[in-house]
Image (cartoon, rainbow, N blue to C red):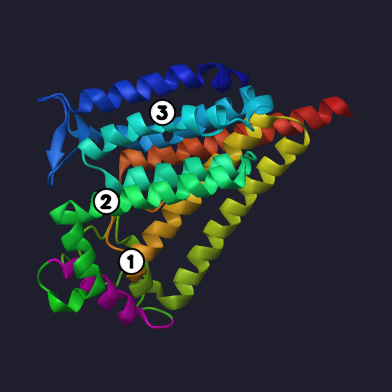
Amino acid sequence: MHIWQRSSRLLMVVGVVMLVLLLVPGLGREVNGSTRWFPIGPLQFQPSEIVKVLVVLYLADHCARKLPQLSTFRVNMIEPALVFSGIAVLLLLEPDYGCTAVILVTVLGMLFLSGIRLIYFCGAFFAGLVAMGVLIFFNPNRLQRVRCFLDPFAEPYGCGYQLVQALIALGSGEWFGVGLGASVQKLFYLPAASNDFLVAVIGEELGLVGIAVLIVLYVSLCWRAFRIADRAGRLGQMFQARVAQGIGLLLTLQVLVNLAVNLGVIPTKGLTLPLMSYGGSSMISCCFAIGLLLAVDRSSQRAVGTKR
């Protein structure tokens, strides 16, 4: 973990450079109006998936190094805001609104858990909400998506098609589902059935019981992340504690957003379901995050063993 801490600022620079290169004409690949991927032969690599974890490492190092100064407005808000604002601009130019929102909430959550003043947190949270609202209101595509979310059945074969098909899949599953592998909606009725709307397919095949089991598994994973963070904090390993908290927040937010999209609670966003959705970049990012959690846990166990 000491190597990761020393490398965190350099890795953040590498992440920013990747996001910049993505916007260079001819380097990034455009899909459905968004330039988020580098083509690597037959494969594609999405830098924003890795950048999410790099932001956690950078902010954990920031909070650990400047722990005595965390009560000051400059260290609390200005310095993280400058870094995040630059990353947010690059992500919005792709555009990738969902990833930007997830990173924003993760950053705010990590700052809150690090002990910043409540008035700073509330001000930053309100400013973030206003910024996201402005981005939606002044973008016709995002505004249309919100309108379709409010009444998807008004255009069931237009902009509301994805959500309508997801709700049909979930409704078809009832309590125990139609059977593993027996989904009808994934047969080209439901778009993105293997990633963004995987939960709808699980609900159709395994029913409400399957969704409940899935939620319990994710709750267990996130609970373990914060347990690891708590033990590291008690041992005085502040960088490790912030990393574990950040990863726990990041995974929890992605799960909540993906579930909310599939259930029609929030407008449709292209965020994958951690450790389950199809997509190499997402899977690499999630395994990277879980690997860091295991490294934090191992570091804490070694510290406990040394004290004994």
Number of residues whose C-alpha sits closer than 10 Å to that of mark 1, classed few (under 14), some (14–19) or many (20 or more): many
- Name the N-terminal-most of marks 1 and 2: 2
Label 3, label 2: how far apart the Cα atoms are: 19 Å
Q: Secondary structure at mark 3?
A: helix
Mark 1 and mark 3 in contact? Answer it, CB < 8 Å: no
Q: Secondary structure at mark 2?
A: helix
Which residue is tagged 2? 134
Q: Is residue 247 left or right of residue 284?
A: right
In x, y percent, where is residue 237?
71, 29
Label 1, label 3: how far apart the Cα atoms are: 33 Å
> What residue span does the magenta drawing correspond to?
159-175
Which residue is tagged 3? 82
- Label disc, if present, on residue 125 of the rendered structure: none
Q: Quadrant of the C terminus?
A: top right
**Image height check: is 13 above or below 105?**
above
- Label disc, if present, on residue 262 of the rendered structure: 1
In x, y percent, where is residue 78?
48, 30
Using the rendered view, name the quadrant where residue 44 is placed.
top left
Q: Amino acid at mark 3?
A: Leu
- Name the N-terminal-most of marks 1 and 3: 3
Label 1, label 2: how far apart the Cα atoms are: 25 Å
